[in-house]
């Protein structure tokens, strides 16, 4: 079954050439070959301000690519224990009230306006993935999943943590192959 997939490539270097860029490319190429419709957002190539107050919400983010998608693939490197600030700024811009969440009646929770979409988060890091999951309890990954995506109604959210990215070349090739398989599956 063909899916509509939006890839959010969250590495903040617009020049490319990083492992996250290669992973996004492997996923994208395989998904297109499998017949999925794919849009890609390279966050580092966008020009948007960081928010300082509610009045600065005038920039029109590429929310149409998120609204269009049935599945989001979010890739980023772990920086200082979290997603890069540029990606966080993008989410603050794109997932606004009225698009991602809607006000509810007094005493009720916000309405989740992005229901019906799924996501897969892929995070790369220099430390072992096991160490990140066990010692740090994958806190930033859980925060993105629970406090941003699921808060907007995006569910299920799957995760892939790739540790030791500066490691052996054969390990990198295996991860590129795995992302290509996920692309074929539309996962």
Image (spheres, rainbow, N blue to C red):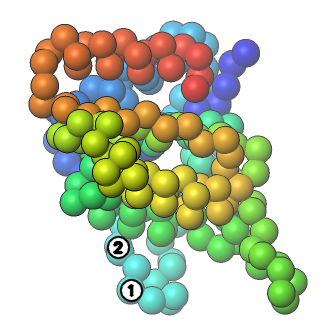
Q: Is residue 30 above or below residue 110?
A: above
| Image quadrant assignment for residue 146 | bottom right
Q: Is residue 87 above or below residue 59?
A: above
Reading the image, the residue beneath label 1 is 52
| Image quadrant assignment for residue 86 | bottom left
Q: Position of residue 104 (x, y in %)?
A: 82, 79
Residue in the picture at 35% in, 75% down: 50
Q: Is residue 32 visible?
A: no
Q: Is residue 64 above or below residue 58?
A: above
Q: Position of residue 180 (x, y in %)?
A: 43, 15
Residue in the picture at 27% in, 26% down: 22
Residue 119: mark in rendering: none
Q: CA distance from mark 1 to mark 2?
A: 9 Å
Within 10 Å of disc 1 (Cα), the crowding (few <14, some 14-19, many 20+) is: few
Q: Is residue 55 above or below residue 124?
A: below
Closer to us: 142 or 87: 142
Q: Is residue 131 visible?
A: yes
Residue in the picture at 39% in, 51% down: 138
In the image: residue 99, left or right of residue 134:
right
In the image: residue 116, left or right of residue 45:
right
> Does the residue at mark 1 contact the one at mark 2 (Cβ under 8 Å)?
yes
Mark 1 element type: loop
Report the mark closest to the observer, 1 or 2: 1
Closer to us: 38 or 163: 163
In the image: residue 177, left or right of residue 145:
left
Reading the image, the residue beneath label 2 is 49
In the image: residue 130, left or right of residue 62:
left
Within 10 Å of disc 2 (Cα), the crowding (few <14, some 14-19, many 20+) is: some
Q: Which quadrant holds the N terminus? A: top right
Mark 2 element type: loop
Q: Position of residue 123 (x, y in %)?
A: 35, 41
């Amino acid at each position: 079954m063909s899916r509509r997939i939006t890839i959010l490539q969250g590495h903040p270097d617009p020049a490319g050439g990083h492992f996250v860029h290669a992973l996004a490319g492997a996923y994208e190429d395989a998904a297109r070959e499998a017949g999925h419709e794919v849009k890609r957002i390279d966050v580092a190539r966008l020009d948007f301000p960081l928010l300082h107050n509610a009045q600065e919400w005038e920039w029109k983010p590429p929310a149409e690519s998120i609204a269009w998608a049935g599945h989001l693939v979010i890739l980023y490197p772990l920086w200082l224990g979290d997603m890069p600030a540029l990606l966080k700024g993008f989410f603050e811009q794109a997932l606004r009230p009225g698009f991602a969440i809607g006000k509810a009646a007094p005493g009720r929770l916000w309405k989740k306006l992005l229901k019906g979409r799924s996501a897969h988060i892929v995070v790369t890091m220099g430390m072992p993935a096991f160490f990140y999951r066990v010692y740090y309890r994958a806190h930033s990954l859980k925060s993105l999943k629970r406090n941003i995506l699921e808060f907007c109604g995006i569910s299920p959210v799957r995760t892939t943590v790739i540790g030791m990215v500066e490691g052996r070349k054969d390990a990198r090739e295996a991860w590129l192959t795995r992302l290509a398989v996920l692309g074929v599956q539309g996962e």
